[in-house]
Image (spheres, grey):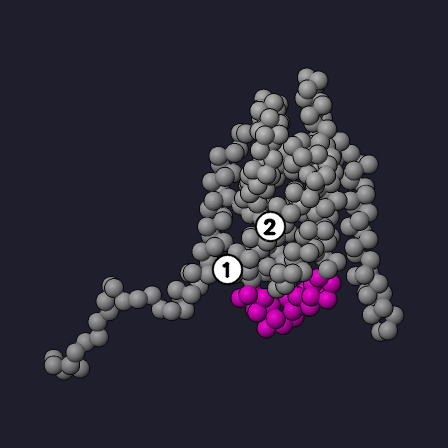
Amino acid sequence: MTQHEARPTVSSTDPIPSSRWVRLRRSLPLAAIMAAGAFGWYMLRDVEGLALLRDNREAMLAFRDANLLIAISVFMAGYVLVAALSVPGATFVTLTGGFLFGVFPGVLFNVTAATLGATILFLAARTSLGDRLAARMDASEGKVRKLKEGIDENQWSMLFVMRLLPVVPFFIANLVPAVVGVSLLRFAVSTFFGIMPGALVFTSVGAGLGEVIAAGESPDLGVIFSPPVLLPLLGLAALSLLPVLAKALRVKGSA
């Protein structure tokens, strides 16, 4: 290179390459939700939900009676936010739905709001991660590809199992479908109907809290984890796995 040849210069103000900018922009929704969720976990870590219901019971019921539509709107908006951010308190909010609105329509409000919040998180995860990871899994070989194919063949069963089993965190049940390429409609339908049995149990418990609190007694939420409640949920989860088992048996029989 001669002294007269211009050397290439790199300006600090050069724009970010379009591919990097696209990846960054796609990551923003999930990053924002995770940041807001972490903040919510920090702020609500010491909040005692049942104490709030006990101390504010009369005021909450009076507001509901005077402003029913506003109470429903505020409650559902709060539940959507809690579900989307995966902050602590989803169980308490479900109990509150029963406490304020009874078993019905309380369970309908609970399931609808939880599904909307879950869908927001699902869409954010799919925008940020899902499409790329699903494409990589489709292009992969060996065990990873077989795992993806197995999930694709039994999506309905796997989605319902994740919703029905109490041991699967709500946050995980929202992220996994986004990563493996589940469609939005299938995710929303399986979420709405999959969480309904558990939501019905929690809503029913919440509907009975008013009388317990009014009597000055301490609510016993241990009933939620008792065999009469858990066994039916586990039974429903087992039923949802029957198509997978039947398909496996057919494949084995034809081999």
Percent of width and height locating residue 101: 67, 35
| Mark 2 crowdedness (10 Å alpha carbons): few <14, some 14-19, many ≥20 | many
Residue at image location 61% in from the left, 24% down from the top: 57
Q: Disc 2 residue type? A: Leu
Q: Is residue 122 within the magenta segment?
A: no
Which residue is disc 2 drawn over? 116
Which type of secondary structure does the marked residue at label 2 adopt? helix
Which type of secondary structure does the marked residue at label 1 adopt? helix
Left or right side of 20 for 146: right
Q: Is residue 206 above or below residue 174?
A: above
Q: Quadrant of residue 54?
A: top right
Left or right side of 117 for 8: left
Residue at image location 72% in from the left, 57% down from the top: 158
Residue at image location 65% in from the left, 32% down from the top: 100
Give the mark toward the camera: 2 or 1: 2
Q: Is residue 80 something that shows in the picture?
A: yes
Q: Is residue 153 within the magenta segment?
A: yes
Looking at this rendering, what residue extends furthest in the left direction?
3
Q: Which residues are magenta?
A: 131-155
Which is more toward the observer, 60 or 236? 60
Q: Disc 1 residue type? A: Ser
Which is more toward the observer, 126 or 110? 110
Left or right side of 80 for 251: right
Q: Quadrant of the N terminus?
A: bottom left
Which residue is disc 1 drawn over? 128
